[in-house]
Image (cartoon, grey):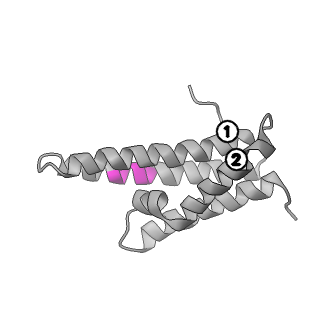
Amino acid sequence: MLAGPRAWAHVMYGLHALSALSGILTSATVVGAFVFGWPSIIAIIINVATKDQVRGTWLATHWRWQWRSFWFAALWLMIAGLLFITLIGIPTALLAIIGTGVWVLYRVIRGWLALLDRRAMPLPL
């Protein structure tokens, strides 16, 4: 049975995966469901509330991975939204939304698999 911070990491990945899955199975986009879906918002709240428990451990890399995944997805969604309001930028916005959705799926899957293997996530460059 899982307990402690590692269990919280699994819960957060599960919540993010649930948001992404709802973007695939409903009329929402993956990135839209990831950023605005309640499961991911709850995961980010858990991330903030529990990050002191993992400071200085290999699990801290997963907290940072999930935090960066969420906020970079939000940033790209805002950029796509700004592009979308122009007629010329609509195709670019759609590509950005689709690309960010694929990136979100990659980040959730890669992070969760690394957690299952008890591996730290790479540090950003």
Q: Is residue 31 above or below residue 107?
A: below
Indicate whether residue 98 is drawn in magenta: yes
Q: Position of residue 54 (x, y in %)?
A: 78, 43
The residue at 73%/40% (across/down) is 60
Which of the 4 quarters of the picture holds residue 98?
A: bottom left
- For disc 1, the marked residue is 121
Residue 103 visible in the current orientation: yes
Residue 120 visible (yes or no):
no
Instruction: State the residue at coordinates (86%, 59%).
Output: 3
- The main secondary structure of the magenta stretch is helix
Find residue 23 and report its horizontal and vertical position in percent: 44, 67
Q: Hey, which quadrant is residue 24 in on the image?
A: bottom left
- Please report the bounds of the magenta region as a residue range: 97-102
Instruction: Give the class, few, some or many, for how many residues have Cα within 10 Å of label 2's Cα (few <14, many ≥20).
Output: few
Which secondary structure lies at badge 2? helix
Picture coordinates of residue 8, whole percent (x, y): 75, 57
Discs 2, 1 touching: Cβ within 8 Å: yes
Which corner quadrant holds the N terminus? bottom right
Q: Residue at x 48, y 59 (%)?
A: 34
Name the residue carrying label 2. 114
